[in-house]
Image (cartoon, helix red, strand yellow):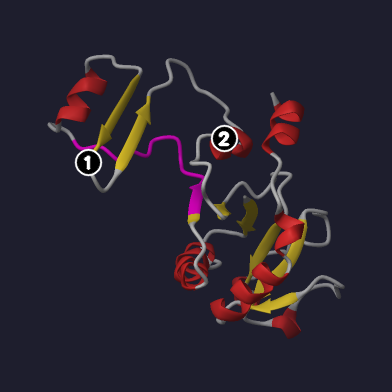
């Protein structure tokens, strides 16, 4: 499995880029999963549904499945600080690429999504895990870089770059979990 992060400030286009990369990678015959960082109060369940009622009754985990989909909801009794590596460990083994959105401070190789118009500072100069920068304004980058600069508006070219450099993104779960548990 190959794992790559996408980091950037809110509104930079991370979600749109990931959304556009998924079909590009699928066209190449690759199976893609996504790990997304969310705010602490998110919910995918709805009041009144059976699964919601089970959670409200105190179930630690609820798994709901059909012939097309599976969802696992786990309730923590106290706030849990799960690393991105813990979340990747929850994924299915047969995936080719995992696209990680958020987790900008993680120790995963990542593409920084940066827009000059937002006026936010870039992270690539101080983050050794930034493998490339995807931007719509390459001439506005605040510092020169030897890292690849990718066209944020060309997901086909970004997917080509990812696949061509795929070996860089091989993920060894044993290595990461051994060093992060």
Residue 75 visible from this viewpoint: yes
Q: Verify whether residue 93 appears in magenta.
A: no
Q: Is residue 100 above or below residue 49?
A: below
Residue name at image x 20 percent, y 37 percent: 46
Relative to 35, 167 lies left or right: right
| Quadrant position of the C terminus in the picture | top right
Rendered position, 146 above or below 48: below
Residue 63 position, x and y percent, is: 30, 29
In percent of width and height, residue 170 lies at 71, 52
Q: Quadrant of residue 177?
A: top right
Magenta segment includes 40? yes
Observer-nearest of 45 and 31 = 31
| Labels 1 and 2: the sequence-earlier one | 1
Mark 1 and mark 2 in contact? Answer it, CB < 8 Å.
no
- For the residue pair 49 and 142, the one nearer the viewer reads as 49
Work out how far the residue at label 1 is from the one at label 2, CA to CA, in angstroms.
22 Å
Q: Is residue 174 left or right of residue 30?
A: right
The crowd level at tag 1 (other Cα within 10 Å; few <14, some 14-19, many 20+) is: few
For marks 1 and 2, give the one nearer the viewer.
Answer: 1
**Which SS class for mark 1?**
loop
Q: Main secondary structure of the magenta part?
A: loop
At 37% from the left edge and 39% from the top edge, which residue is drawn? 42
Dot 2: what SS?
helix
- Reply above or below: 165 against 2: below
Q: Dot 2: within a 10 Å radius of its alpha carbon, few (fewer than 14), some, or many (20 or more) residues?
A: few
Q: Viewer-proximal residue, 141 or 15?
A: 15
Q: Residue at x 53, y 42 (%)?
A: 93
**Does the image show residue 123?**
no
Residue that carries the numbered disc 2 in the rendered image: 89
Residue labelled with disc 1: 66
Range covered by the magenta-colored residues: 33-46
Residue sitting at x 75%, y 59%: 167
């Amino acid at each position: 499995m190959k794992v790559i992060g996408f980091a950037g400030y809110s509104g930079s286009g991370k979600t749109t880029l990931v959304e556009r990369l998924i079909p590009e990678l699928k066209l190449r015959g690759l199976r893609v999963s996504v790990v997304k960082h969310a705010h602490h109060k998110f919910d995918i369940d709805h009041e009144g549904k059976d699964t919601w009622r089970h959670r409200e009754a105190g179930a630690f985990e609820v798994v709901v499945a059909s012939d097309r989909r599976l969802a696992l909801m786990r309730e923590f009794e106290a706030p849990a600080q799960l690393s991105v590596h813990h979340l990747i460990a929850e994924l299915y083994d047969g995936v080719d690429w995992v696209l990680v959105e958020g987790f900008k401070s993680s120790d995963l190789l990542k593409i920084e999504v940066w827009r000059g118009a937002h006026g936010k500072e870039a992270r690539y100069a101080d983050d050794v895990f930034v493998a490339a920068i995807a931007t719509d304004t390459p001439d506005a980058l605040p510092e020169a870089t030897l890292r690849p600069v990718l066209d944020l508006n060309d997901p086909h070219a970004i997917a080509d770059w990812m696949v061509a450099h795929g070996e860089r993104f091989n993920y060894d779960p044993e290595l990461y979990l051994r060093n992060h548990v």
